[in-house]
Amino acid sequence: MLRLTTFLFVLSALLLSASDKPNVLIIVADDLGYHDVGFQGSKEIPTPNLDKLAASGVRCTNGYVSHPFCSPTRAGLMTGRYQHRFGHENNPAWLPEDSKQGLPLDQRTLPELLQKVGYATGAVGKWHLGAHPQFHPMKRGFQEYFGALGGGHIYFPGDKAGAEYTIPLNRNGVNEPQTKYLTEQFGDEASAFIQRHAGVEKAPWLLYLAFNAPHTPLQAPESWLKKLAHITDPDRRTYAAMICALDAAVGQVTEKLAGTKQTENTLIFFFSDNGGPNLSGKGKSNFTDNSPLRGAKGMVYEGGMRVPFLISWPAKLKPSTYDQPVIALDVLPTALAIAKAALPADRTIDGVNLIPYLTGNKPGAPHERLFWRSLGPQGNHAMRQGNWKLVHLPGGKAELYDLASDIGETKNLASEKPQIVTQLSSAISDWEKGTIPPVFEGPKQAKAPAKKKSKK
Ligand code: CA
């Protein structure tokens, strides 16, 4: 019986040609609020295309990213590992001459690993994993790239902003002019990639579509602004219009998948790289909505890294909601598993293949525990175990919340449950043994010594 099973397995593996392998499409939004898309409950911001994707796939109600801000989350996504293991805990400065500010070169990336098993790999959009040429997407596993290499970008051609946000767009290492509203241009490029790689004779593909929307600067097409007159705050209206443009670009992409008969066998992930920012203060308004979560981008309360999170793969996954915690670190092992590619054996991979959990073949939770740390070993810590959430901020006492009854982290139970605080704190200490301090500082710290040097 065992022999027959083995024989059938080998036979099916042989019959499975490269083109039967699923495509993988990772769509990342930037600084999107938890409550700012229809499928998360927004009544203000219409997102019909994302809602359709949610309705046809799995909506993960406890979906996380591994960091409360941009670049470290992307480092975790690309490697399937807590980025603290290799010191990528800050945003890299825009310093093309600095070979330290970027995703460390000894890290293996998802596109690199999928390329080894015959995938065509492309990235469109925001990179933010290092400005030095050695960190270019095409040096890190992508065969094709079009986008903005920094941490953000102007949306309309010719707009004014700082150096990082006005760099020329980059196609396969060569500068190229921006031709239209950036979110639309990224939608066009992603669709073109999908068209180019469609067809039974073609290799399966990975496309990483990383929108910089709705990250600031707040700039939106008039056509969308007109449709959102019901939102009175001008900043929130512009931000909402940016989300509508993103939704339209997602619609363009999913229509292209349908038009090229690739919907069924394409695994799609959609999530935001961190929570919505809470930009309060003079001249700014709190235009994102992370309700019912506490906190915002940059914080280790839920509002910092619990995000809208979708997984769609019509060939295998039934429309549903999934309530166990999942994290963007799971993308790499999930994609490698369905591509029948091996995980790197020489290092710890923290993500897990989610498919058996999402299909119900495997009971239980994919993760016993999840951890977050921001701003180094002396910085902010958090962890989740079951429904318990521990938050430990510098200089403060550990806080404990029961997310099952208190998703908004309003009632600190630390004094009532000291033994749980002790247990979770000890788990954080154990986890931290597998991490290192940041190998590069954030942009502000990184620029300071460079200035000093030039004065000498
Ligand atoms: Ca971000």
Image (cartoon, rainbow, N blue to C red):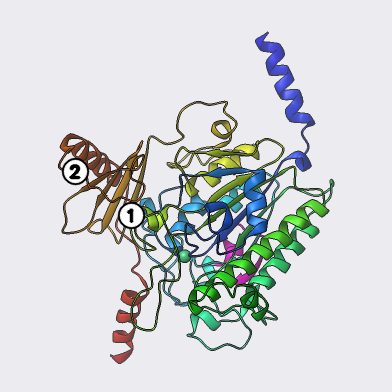
SS under mark 1 = loop
Does label 1 point to a residue whose CB lies under 8 Å from ligand 1? Answer: no
Badge 1: residue crowd in 10 Å (few <14, some 14–19, many ≥20): many
Compare marks 1 and 2 and give the one earlier in the sequence. 1
Outermost residue to the top: 1
Q: Is residue 11 left or right of residue 230?
A: right
Question: Which stretch appears magenta?
Answer: 136-148
Q: Amino acid at mark 2?
A: Ala
| Image position of 293 (left or right of 11) | left
Q: Amino acid at mark 1?
A: Tyr
Q: Position of residue 139 (x, y in %)?
A: 58, 63
Q: Which residue is mark 1?
A: 301
At 39% from the left and 63% from the top, the residue drawn is 297
**Circle 2 residue:** 414
Residue at 27% from the left image edge and 57% from the top image edge: 380
Whether residue 4 is visible here, answered yes or no, is: yes
- Give how far across and how far down residue 225 sits, in percent: 61, 77
Position of residue 99 measured from the top left corner of the image (x, y, whole percent): 44, 70
Q: Position of residue 352 (x, y in %)?
A: 49, 38
